[in-house]
Amino acid sequence: MNQPLAAKPVPFIDIAAQRQRLGSRIDAAVARVLAHCQFINGPEVTALEAGLAAYTGARHVVACASGTDALLMVLMARGIGPGDAVLCPSFTFCATAEVVALLGATPVFVDVEPDTFNIDMASLARGLVKARALGRAPKAIIPVDLFGQSADHDAIAELAAREGLFVLDDACQGFGATYNGRRLGTFGLATATSFFPAKPLGCYGDGGAIFTDDDALAETLRSIRVHGQGGDKYDNVRLGLTARLDTVQAAVLIEKLAIFDDEIVARERAARRYAEGLADAVTVPRVAEGRTSVWAQYTIRLPAGRRDAFAAALRADGIPTAIYYPTPLHRQTAYRHYPVADGGLPVSEQLSAEVISLPMHAYLDETTQARVIKAVRGAVGK
Ligand SMILES: *Cc1c(COP(=O)(O)O)cnc(C)c1O
């Protein structure tokens, strides 16, 4: 036997390795917050917003409590509500559509491309026709930069301009990725991201941010973030939320942002090694021309029906896998009464039956990755 019986389990995402690398810098950053005690809207929040603005090139950054709040706040600021339709992919995390439904508007689900997993333009056009046929007023598109890869933002912007819609980019997985050399955060009316610990740029709890070049929108978002406050705290000019980012999380994120580019390079290197080791054995993801991915997930496809046995074989080798997403939103209990684009969403349904994600993070060393590749090849008999 050339492998020990119980080989050390491989982490799916290695948050501990990064914690070790940053070590005392994070401890010191958190200690500074514990010393100044400005736990809400402390100086680190403003510093982080400035750092994120410089990183993306966006004019305004509004830090907030989660990626979901980031999406929700933009829709609230634009007055989205009953009678409105918002188009979004079905093959995504539920929050993309949840924020639309929470406001009483109608999410209209559209399909994705089989190789990039991102919004399909033909289905998007059909979704628009469907929304109007149902008597809803289409107001916005929420494209998702799924698994870390930028969506086709030029094509989306062109359709949005032609149809009078605004674009809210859900970059909760894609923060740090580029489209034609430009970082996400600068496409559409606004961009939402999440700092949930497992995202490419994560904090040590919940967090998020909104990016926009629109001065008036930024001001409204800052008001919504604190219960719709006006000139002062007890002047309430609109409905809002408690949606601030904690100062402690901002302090953590400042340290993580400093090494983020280096981590993106490491993720890209790991993705390349997977592609080289697996392209002839399974369907590996494709990154479209002019785009990059920050590899929030490394998601392969297997023929339908093979996935359970495949996952079990890897688990036996100490290698975890995950399925994002086993059920497209239009088939979920909470969402199945909402409309879908004409022609249905066959790609979303097929992907849900075929996708499986492999361990992926910036600290995936070559030896560990070789072990994953060998296990994957073994499980598919290659
Ligand atoms: C994680 C995620 C969100 C929500 O972010 P939270 O910070 O968990 O609220 C929204 N959309 C997508 C695509 C996500 O992956």
Image (cartoon, rainbow, N blue to C red):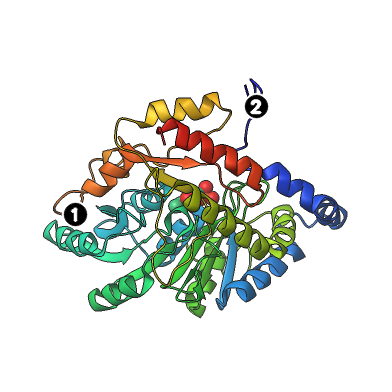
Foreground: 147 or 382? 382
Label 1, on which residue? 341
| Amino acid, disc 2 | Ala
Residue 148 in the image: x percent, y percent? 48, 57
- Mark 1 or mark 2, which is nearer to you? 2
- Name the spot of residue 181 as percent of width and height, x first: 50, 76
At mark 2, the secondary structure is loop
Residue at the extreme left of the image, as rendered: 133
Q: Residue at x 26, y 59 (%)?
A: 85
- Quarter of the image with the C terminus in it: top left
Task: Confirm if mark 1 falls within 8 A of ligand 1.
Answer: no
Compared with 318, 348 (above or below) is below
Residue at image mark 2: 7
Q: Position of residue 345 (x, y in %)?
A: 22, 48
Residue 308 badge? none
Residue at image coords 56%, 78%: 59
User: Badge 2 local density, few (<14 within 10 Å), some, or many (20+)?
Assistant: few
Quadrant housing the N terminus: top right
Q: Quadrant of residue 169?
A: bottom left
Dot 1 amino acid type: Ala
